[in-house]
Image (cartoon, coloured by chain):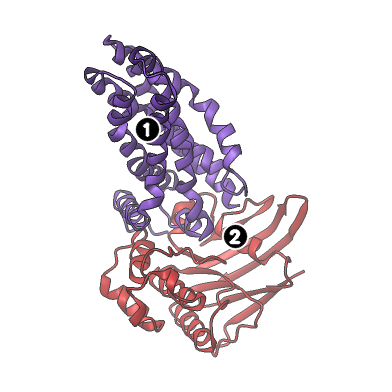
Amino acid sequence: MSAPQVAFRTAAALLMGRDLRLALRRAGDSLLPLGFFLVITTLFPLALDPALSLLRDIAPAALWVGALLSSLLALDLLFRDDSQDGALEQLALCGQPFAGLLLAKTAVHWLLTGLPLVLMAPLAATALGAPYGAMPGILAALLLGTIALSLIGAVGAGLTLTLRRNGSLLALLVLPLAVPVLIFGARATALAIQGESLAAPLYLLGAMAVLSATLAPWALAAAVRIGLE
Amino acid sequence: MNDIRAENLHVWRGDLHVLRGLSFVVHGGECLQVTGANGSGKTTLLRALCGLVPLEHGRVCWRAADIAANPAAYHSDLAYLGHENGLKGDLTAIENLRYGIGLRRRLAVTDCAAALAQVGLSEQRAVPLRRLSAGQRRRVALARLSLMDAALWILDEPSSNLDAAGQGLLVELLERHLGTGGLAVVATHQELVLPSGRVRTVTLQ
């Protein structure tokens, strides 16, 4: 039998290029979760007593619950179109490692929804009264956290691929799995705001990002294959 | 030698025993037409041949090797066209071909243009696909099929949405594919007539 003529790296780069181009043609869809994050996080200072100390106390929770819900909202974009128009089964049958292709898709998804959230987080954090010196810590925690959230969420999206009203089931599946990310992410953010060392929760977030990047592709491929049956 | 062999296939869909011990062989240069009433399991059979649907019993062999042993190698010889075209509505015809084929083999842009000319869509090459008609989108899918350079074609209702000229085009593509030693398994409601007569029919109950 003939080996695939295109190296996996080339195929993955091509697929990522395709998804980026599709997202550019539908820029509104990709920006929606970011807008949601900014609105949610800036609602807190408006609804609360504008005492700086109170805002700083709730800032980690507001940032991370916002990031979590926004990543959940974004998951809908990941496989829905490809599943409906048959592109996903073409990917499964193209002779390239399916888990790798799905990881490439998830990476693009993070670039489009996770990274913008990280980059805009200082704005939301400022609105929540976080000091300027806390920004590097907040950014680092969100960077690692959103990577883990995208990967965990992708598995959930794969599992609920064929269900019609999958939004609420997706939330029930993904949110419990995302709790460790929420706990350590919020802890890292709180330590950053207090000006203390946040190495410990940051290491744990990093470990979670690496662990999910290692395991999620296989779970994802198995989940999507079930959806294609 | 190209051949696909189905041995005693049993497939269940939920509580339904859809395929009950189906066996056949298709050799290079042959086309197997799968017919049967709605719900008789044509699509299930085709997806089982692709390895998308798990078999309860039996096996599918491509070139005498079980497809489950090395799916990646099998899939690089396989071109599948399902009910859905697997094309993106926001991409143009040329882009769809470039991304669809590029995952499998290197492709020159001129090849894409030639394939689109062959299916009569030269002028629509730069139009986003969602602005084309369903039949035109099917023609783009046929262009992708002809570019895939796969020995085995598995086609599910390939002539749906195609006009008379489009169906002629499909026959022409199939003839050329069979002529070069390729083989095809085609599910269809309308009888497929190839001038060379290299069609066999299996009817699902």
The location of residue B125, given as percent across then percent down, is 34, 76
| On-image quarter of the C terminus of chain B | bottom right
Image point (37%, 60%), residue name? B104
The residue under the point 39% across, 33% down is A213
| Chain in purple colour | A
Q: In front: A70, or A51?
A: A51
Which circle marks residue A147 in the picture? 1
State whether discs 1 and 2 lie on one chain: no
Amino acid type shown at disc 1: Ile
Q: Secondary structure at mark 2?
A: helix
Observer able to see residue A222: no
Q: State the residue at coordinates (68%, 58%).
A: B9
In the image, residue A189 sits, relative to residue B58, either above or below, namely above
Q: Mark 1 touching mark 2, by CB under 8 A? A: no
Chain letter for the residue marked with disc 1 in the picture: A
Q: Nearer the viewer, residue B129 or A13?
A: B129
Instruction: Name the front one of labels 1 and 2.
Output: 1
Nearest the eye: B129 or B2: B129
* Count of numbered circles on the image: 2
Q: Residue at x 32, y 73 (%)?
A: B126
Q: Is residue A225 left or right of residue A13?
A: right
Q: Is residue A200 left or right of residue B66?
A: left
Q: Can residue A153 be seen in the rendering of this structure? A: yes
Q: Nearer the viewer, residue B161 or B191?
A: B161
- Does A128 sit above or below residue B140? above
Give SS at disc 1: helix
Residue B194: image quadrant is: bottom right
Q: Which mark is residue B162?
A: none
Q: Colour of chain B?
A: red
Residue on which the image places disc 2: B47
